[in-house]
C-alpha cells in the first residue's frame, strides 16, 4: 500500500451534529489510522465543534489547519481568505486533495488552486448535486456553479458519490469520472445498553414495553419529519401506547412547524420531541427504539440510518434515502415518502415481532458487510492511489 499525503477540505467539521461534518471527522481518523498523512483543512465556522486534534496515529499522521472566517459574509459563503494563500504555498506537498461538498467558496478556491498547481483532486459532493438541493435558492446556486464551480467540477480527477442513487440524481454528469463508495460509521461500543435504554424511556415518559419509532437527524423539510408525525397517527389508532421519538435540533421555521403540528394532533401525547442527543445518550436512543424511520426526499447516504443498522435496528426508509441494501438484506422496508404507504408499513412491522427480530440480525449483517471502516476505507484508499498516480510536480516547501 502506498503511503499517501492527503489534503481533505471541508467548510466545517462538527462531531456534535449530523451528516457531512461527522463523516469528515471520521474519515480523517480512519485514513490516518490506515497509515496515511492527512491534513484537514477547514474554517472556524460557528457550526464547527469537536474538530480533531493534530496527532500521530501509528504510521499515519493527522494534522489540522483551521482558518479564520471573520465577518458574517465569509461565514455565509464558507470563505476563509487565508486558506487560498496557504494552499498556493503548500498544496504541492499533497499527493491529492479531497474536496468535501459543493456549495462553498472554499471548495471552489481549492479546486482552482489544485488545477493551477497540477495537484489532482477528488470531489465528494455529499448529496449536494441532487435536484432537491439545487432547488433551494436555485438562482443563486446556478450562478455560483456557473461562475465558481463548473471548471472545478470538470477538472476533478474523480467524483466520489456515496450511493448509486446519488450518482444517478446528480444535476451535472461526472462524465465517466464518477465512482460510488459509501459512507461508513464507527460501530457502537460493544456494551450492554439495556439499562441506558430503560433510563432514557423513563426520562422521556415512555413505558418499558411500548413500541418506539425513532427519527434521528436534522429536522428539516428534506427529512420529511412533518409527514412522519402525521403518518404516525394511524399507528396510534391501532397501537395506542406506541411512541414516536424525534431526536434532532428543532430550529428555524421548520422546527417550529414540527412542534406546532405535533402539539395540534389528537395523538400529541404519543410524540416526544427530545432535541439533539449525542454520545451515550444517542446510543441509548437507538437501543430504546423498536424501529428507525426517516422519510428523506434527497440524500447522498443517510448517516443516521447507517448508525441504526449498526445497532441492529430495523429501518423504514423512503426510496430517495438511497439505501436499497435495506431491502436486499431484508433489514427493513422502503416506501414512498409522498404516498400512503408509510403508516401501513410502520403498523405491519410493529405488529410482527418475529419479523423485527430477523430484520435486526440482518441489519447488523448489512452494516458489518457494507458500512464499516474496514469495508469502506480500502476502497477510498484505492481511489486515492489511482488519482495520485498522475505525475506530481517537484515539492516546493514542507507543510508547517
Image (cartoon, rainbow, N blue to C red):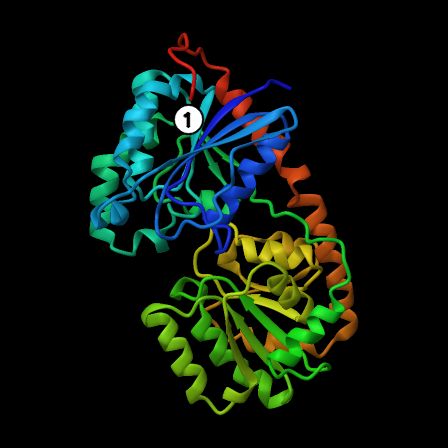
Residue lying farthest bottom? 266
Quick one: 386 or 194, which is closer to the camera? 194
Given residues 109 and 201, the one toward you in this image is 201
According to the picture, the residue beneath numbered tag 1 turns out to be 121
Q: Residue at x 38, y 21 (%)?
A: 91
Quarter of the N terminus within the rendering: top right
Q: Residue at x 38, y 27 (%)?
A: 156
**In the rendered image, which quarter is residue 371 located in?**
top right
- Residue 166 percent coordinates (x, y): 46, 46
Residue 77: percent from left, percent from top:
26, 45
Query: Which residue is nearer to you in this view: 165 or 64?
Result: 64
Q: How many marks?
A: 1
State the image coordinates of residue 388 (x, y, percent, origin top left): 49, 19
What secondary structure is marked by label 1?
A: strand
* Residue at 48% over, 57% down: 320
Q: Is residue 313 above or below residue 103?
A: below
Q: Is residue 342 visible?
A: yes
| Residue 327 visible (yes or no) | no
Q: Residue at x 73, y 64 (%)?
A: 193
| Residue lying furthest top | 394
391 above or below 18?
A: above
Amino acid at each position: 500500500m502506498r503511503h499517501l499525503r492527503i489534503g481533505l477540505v471541508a467548510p466545517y467539521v462538527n462531531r456534535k451534529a449530523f451528516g457531512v461534518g461527522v463523516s469528515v471527522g471520521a474519515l480523517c481518523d480512519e485514513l490516518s489510522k490506515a497509515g496515511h498523512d492527512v491534513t484537514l483543512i477547514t474554517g472556524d465556522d460557528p457550526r464547527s465543534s469537536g474538530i480533531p486534534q493534530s496527532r500521530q496515529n501509528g504510521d499515519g499522521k493527522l494534522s489540522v489547519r483551521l482558518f479564520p472566517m471573520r465577518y458574517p459574509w465569509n461565514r455565509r459563503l464558507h470563505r476563509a481568505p487565508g486558506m487560498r494563500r496557504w494552499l498556493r504555498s503548500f498544496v504541492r506537498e499533497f499527493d491529492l486533495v479531497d474536496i468535501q461538498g459543493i456549495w462553498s467558496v472554499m471548495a471552489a478556491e481549492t479546486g482552482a488552486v489544485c488545477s493551477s498547481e497540477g495537484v489532482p483532486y477528488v470531489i465528494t459532493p455529499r448529496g449536494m448535486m441532487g435536484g432537491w438541493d439545487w432547488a433551494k435558492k436555485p438562482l443563486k446556486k446556478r450562478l455560483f456553479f456557473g461562475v465558481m464551480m463548473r471548471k472545478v467540477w470538470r477538472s476533478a480527477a474523480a467524483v466520489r458519490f456515496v450511493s448509486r442513487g446519488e450518482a444517478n440524481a446528480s444535476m451535472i454528469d461526472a462524465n465517466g469520472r464518477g465512482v460510488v463508495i459509501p459512507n461508513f460509521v464507527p460501530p457502537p461500543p460493544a456494551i450492554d445498553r439495556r439499562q441506558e435504554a430503560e433510563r432514557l424511556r423513563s426520562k422521556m415518559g415512555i413505558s418499558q414495553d411500548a413500541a418506539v419509532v425513532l427519527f434521528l437527524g436534522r429536522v428539516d423539510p428534506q427529512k420529511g419529519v412533518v409527514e412522519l408525525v402525521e403518518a404516525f397517527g394511524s399507528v396510534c389508532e391501532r397501537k395506542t401506547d406506541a411512541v414516536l421519538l424525534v431526536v434532532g435540533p428543532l430550529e428555524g421555521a421548520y422546527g417550529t412547524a414540527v412542534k406546532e403540528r405535533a402539539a395540534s394532533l389528537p395523538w400529541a401525547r404519543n410524540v416526544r420531541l427530545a432535541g439533539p442527543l449525542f454520545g451515550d445518550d444517542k446510543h441509548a436512543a437507538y437501543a430504546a427504539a423498536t424501529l428507525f424511520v426517516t422519510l428523506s426526499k434527497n440524500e447522498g447516504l443517510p448517516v443516521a440510518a447507517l448508525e441504526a443498522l449498526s445497532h441492529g435496528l430495523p429501518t423504514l426508509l423512503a426510496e430517495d434515502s438511497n439505501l436499497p441494501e435495506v431491502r436486499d438484506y431484508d433489514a427493513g422496508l422502503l416506501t414512498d415518502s409522498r404516498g400512503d404507504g408509510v403508516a401501513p408499513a410502520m403498523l405491519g412491522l410493529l405488529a410482527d415481532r418475529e419479523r423485527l427480530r430477523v430484520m435486526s440480525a440482518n441489519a447488523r449483517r448489512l452494516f458489518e458487510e457494507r458500512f464499516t471502516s474496514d469495508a469502506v476505507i480500502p476502497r477510498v484508499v484505492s481511489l486515492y492511489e489511482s488519482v495520485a498516480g498522475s505525475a506530481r510536480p517537484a515539492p516546493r516547501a514542507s507543510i508547517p
